[in-house]
Image (spheres, rainbow, N blue to C red):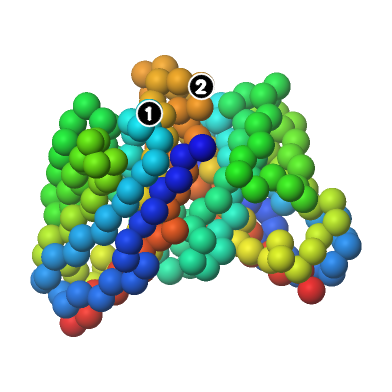
Amino acid sequence: GENVEQHPSTLSVQEGDSAVIKCTYSDSASNYFPWYKQELGKRPQLIIDIRSNVGEKKDQRIAVTLNKTAKHFSLHITETQPEDSAVYFCAASRFGTGTASKLTFGTGTRLQVTL
Amino acid sequence: DADVTQTPRNRITKTGKRIMLECSQTKGHDRMYWYRQDPGLGLRLIYYSFDVKDINKGEISDGYSVSRQAQAKFSLSLESAIPNQTALYFCATSGPRTGGSYEQYFGPGTRLTVT
């Protein structure tokens, strides 16, 4: 089955700096890669996702890049703000098959944005 | 607003007891999931169901069972609870595969403690 590794496990940045979280996956057939954000005491929520037919996707201050050859994808947050402090999870799955909705999650990255 | 709800939100139980966690959704989604979250281990899939007649084991199904009573209800049971099942449990839903988003919507979570 799929295995997703996520690094780093914790990340501290100063407000205004950029943050990068990296994930690798093992199943070359995986083609859907979402990122979820979980604020303290809250439920995980989707913030951005990417499919394997594109290499990069942006949404305001967040972006995700995908390298299919190397089987890794990354989340980039620019101009970080205190409200970006949370745990971020990457995930991978196969798109377009009966198992497409079954996500394998990484172990999470706790991002702390300091003033 | 359409939502995913879980009951109970917190539960303390003793080793050997049977316990049921319930999940209901008003999103009209056909796919439902149960995850457990442990510090440092991320979100791990216990069971998932793509419709009322479809139940599938996830990566950590041992010691758990599920029931899909209706499209909107998906229950997780621990037949004989043990301390290492102490965790935060999330239910999630997602919409139909064809033409739909793959976003998973999480419930608020159930914090279970087994003493």
Q: Say what secondary structure mark 1 lies in.
A: loop
* Within-10-Å neighbours for mark 2: few <14, some 14–19, many 20+: few
At horizontal 26% and vertical 46% (from top left) the residue drawn is A73
Residue B66 percent across, percent down from the top left: 74, 40
Whether residue B41 is visible to the viewer of this picture, yes or no, is yes
Q: Is residue A39 above or below residue A96?
A: below
Whether residue B101 is visible to the viewer of this picture, yes or no, is no
Residue at the right extreme of this rendering: B16
Tag 1 and tag 2, C-beta contact below 8 Å: no
Which residue in the structure is indicated by mark 2?
A98
Chain bearing tag 1 is A
Query: Whole-Å distance between the Cαs marked 1 and 2?
Result: 13 Å
Work out whether residue A79 or residue A51 is closer to the camera in this orientation and state it: A51
The image quarter in which residue B54 lies: top right
Which residue in the structure is indicated by mark 1?
A29
Chain bearing tag 2 is A
Residue at the bottom extreme of this rendering: A115
The image quarter in which residue A48 lies: top left
N-terminal label among 1 and 2: 1
* Within-10-Å neighbours for mark 1: few <14, some 14–19, many 20+: few
Task: Report the side of A10 relative to A15 (left or right).
Answer: right
Amino acid at the residue labelled 2: Gly
Residue B5 percent across, percent down from the top left: 59, 48
Q: Is residue B92 above or below residue B96?
A: below
Amino acid at the residue labelled 1: Ala
Work out whether residue B72 or residue B115 is closer to the camera in this orientation and state it: B115
Q: Is residue A26 above or below residue A20?
A: above
Residue B28 percent across, percent down from the top left: 53, 29
Work out whether residue B26 or residue B60 is closer to the camera in this orientation and state it: B60
